[in-house]
Image (spheres, rainbow, N blue to C red):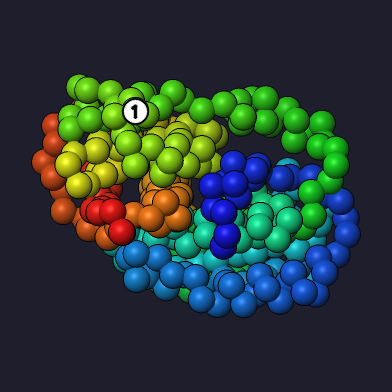
Amino acid sequence: MDNITETIRNRRSVRTFDGKEIIAEDMEKLSSFMAKIDNPYDIPVEFKILNAKEQKLSCPVVSGTDIYVGAKVRRAPHIEEAFGYSFEKLVLYAQSLGIGTVWVGGTMDRAAFERAMNLSEDEMMPCVSPLGYPSKKMSVKENMMRKATKANSRLPFESLFFDGTFDVPLTEEKAGSLAGALEMVRWAPSAVNKQPWRVVVDKNAAHFYLKRNKGFISDAAGNLQKIDLGIALCHFALAAKESGLSISLNINDPGITTESDTEYIASYLFMKA
């Protein structure tokens, strides 16, 4: 993908589509990209194109398209983070083609989608997304949902990112070469726009944490907020690489003091290319 920063900034969640069929060239590009998506956890995520009309699927918050993409993953440690990372890569690639998407985790007939995905007992399908060209005008329902979640707003930079410890907010100026990648984390999508990621930058590492919100629990479909952290890791990685940083992921807890509602997820080690 070219110009990942512009792609991230231009993308929004789309629930109202124009009803036009996705052109064959775009669908071929999307299918080819899906087949080679990876993530830093090396956990395979299997994607599948679904047709709501043919497979009797329903999602009441979506209108104007019958085409969806589903994804499933075998149960193992870190699958939510891996799923979020891989699915967001697909979402951003779709955006680069002009195809709209929205993360759907609850407002759908989950049983029907899981049957369409041929989900086995050792697999999990956390989310799906509709695919199509965005309508020029949002539905009333979509407008209401965006207003309810304040979809266009984000927490301030200094509320999400910290310098060495959670006691010291990180400014964009102090972030230096990491400022652009962290800003792309800030604009990542998240369930109900809760923005649960927190990042502590310490020397040559960016440590990612989950600040849990009430009401989000792990279930058969996984932990949605850990999926959000996978999305954040994806944005950071793609933007950091675009800015010329060489990065690598590890999951060694640095032992930074946290509050009880804050959980270590992963770290990116970095150096200038």
The three-letter code of the residue at mark 1 reads: Glu
In this image, 230 relative to 251: left or right?
right
Residue 200: horizontal and vertical position, in percent? 25, 36
Tell me the quarter of the picture where residue 31 sits.
bottom right
Tell me the quarter of the picture where residue 143 sits.
top right
Residue 23: horizontal and vertical position, in percent? 82, 69
Residue at left 70%, top 69%? 50
Q: Nearer the viewer, residue 187 or 64?
A: 187
SS at badge 1: helix
Residue topped by disc 1: 173
Residue 139, compared with residue 95, is above or below; it is above
In this image, 51 relative to 231: left or right?
right
Q: Nearer the viewer, residue 177 or 146?
A: 177
Residue at left 14%, top 36%? 256
Residue 47: horizontal and vertical position, in percent? 57, 71
Image quarter hosting the N terminus: bottom right
